[in-house]
Image (tube, grey):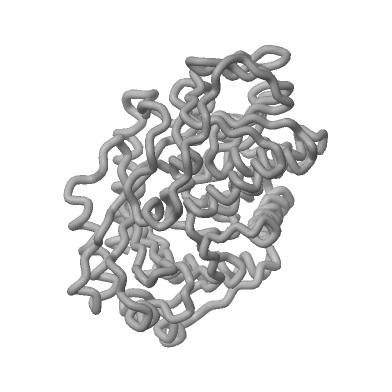
Amino acid sequence: MTLARPAGQPHAPSWYAASVPEVSLRPALRGDTQADVCVLGAGYTGLSAALSLAERGYRVTVLEAQRVGWGASGRNGGQAIVGFGCEVDTLERLVGKFNARALFDYSREGMALLRRRLQHYQIACDWRDGHASVPINGRQERELRRGMQRLVEHYDYPLQWWDRTQLRGQLDSPRYRGAMFDVASGHLHPLAYAQGLARAAESLGVVIHEASPVQQLLREPRPQLRTADGSVRADHVVIAGNALLAGIAPELESRIMPVGTYIGATPVLGEERARRLIRNDMAVADVSWALDYFKLSADHRLLFGGRASYSALPPPGLRGVMTRRMHHVFPQLRDVGLEQVWGGFVDITRNRAPHWGRLTPNVYFAQGFSGHGVAATGLAGEVIAAAIAGQNERLDAFARIPHRRFPGGPLLRTPLLVAAMSWYKLRDVLW
């Protein structure tokens, strides 16, 4: 699936883009240059890798086709959650209990890294503590409670179960049966976070070229990334294009599926009305396959996300569908619509586990965050930077996760995935 676009486009219209200061376009790459490490992509993964490498003293160049945080990093729901896109029992089936525990503990390190960086580099991105996973029906509640018990007892991860009454004390919605509350997770302003990572990296000497889409990766002993107007030859290359690689590494693209996801912002509700919706300012997500997720903004809007698209086009009647879903969660907002709706692509793997590793001994990659990338991308960048510096243990642990291609090839994999997702959506309704 090719998502090629003209280079250097402005950010998609969104509340996120409208609520941060405008940043001038960084110069595109012109001519041939060299670096210790060249990174493809200035989203969370690429910027985190660049920052971790610069902290170790490497000369780093980042090539970005559009703008810093232009893709999922600047458009997502902003929910930073410990763990990965798959549950720990999936990790256990893939790599065994011992390795699954190590991977989960690494994810906790990723959350701690995110918090340290926000403080150390003074990244102002409206961080708030707390995330609640909420079930809608009895089956979801049973599965969520079993999963929580497993994390508490076997992974030593502290979580709280809130019954319906306790949840209603914090979340004014009749829809949910309870909540698994995680105080260590939280939420932020995604585009402000991406821009803060870029400023932190540049303060350590990282060079970021925007409007510089990579056209070719040369897998040579000293690899090279080429654009239309220049090239960067480096000792190491990091591929962090995720859902927007567009032909650079076909063996990576075949193992992820770009999936559109969407979010909207209400008009300003006012502090009192907004706080009545979510009193403790946590982020919330239900546990359906076609999930809803939501939080409050710093200026007292409700940011409400959901829906999914497995093609390059948004679902028909998107604003109306999302508004109805929001009203189903919060009937008291029947008089409120969505002022803006926007979306973007996340990259999912077949097993929803992270796909990180090496293409060659000096070409690294991280992809497949499956909707859980806000915290995990920082970990990915740090893990790859450590491997480039000679500390391979953690990257090797992720590289042991097996990943299969999506069936059907470029033409049929999207219809096959739509059929599979339709079954899971039906199951959420019937059970």
Q: Position of residue 86 (x, y in %)?
A: 53, 51
Q: At x 65% / y 43%, what residue is drawn?
A: 201
Residue 162 sits above or below residue 149 on the image = below
Residue 133 sits above or below residue 289 on the image = below
Q: Position of residue 49 (x, y in %)?
A: 66, 40
Q: At x 66% / y 26%, what residue is drawn?
A: 237
Q: Residue furthest front?
A: 24
The residue nearer to you, when weighing 160 against 30, is 30
Residue 381 visible, this angle = no
Q: At x 76% / y 43%, what residue is drawn?
A: 55
In the displayed structure image, the side of residue 17 where residue 193 appears, left or right: right
The residue nearer to you, when weighing 424 against 63, is 63
Residue 60 visible, this angle = yes
Quadrant containing the N terminus in the rendered view: top left
Q: Position of residue 258 (x, y in %)?
A: 40, 37
In the displayed structure image, the side of residue 328 where residue 217 appears, left or right: right
The residue nearer to you, when weighing 151 against 108, is 108
Q: Residue furthest right?
A: 390
Q: Which quadrant would residue 156 be assigned to in this image?
A: bottom right
The residue nearer to you, when weighing 359 against 275, is 275
Residue 358 sits above or below residue 292 on the image = above
> How many numbered circles does the render carry?
0
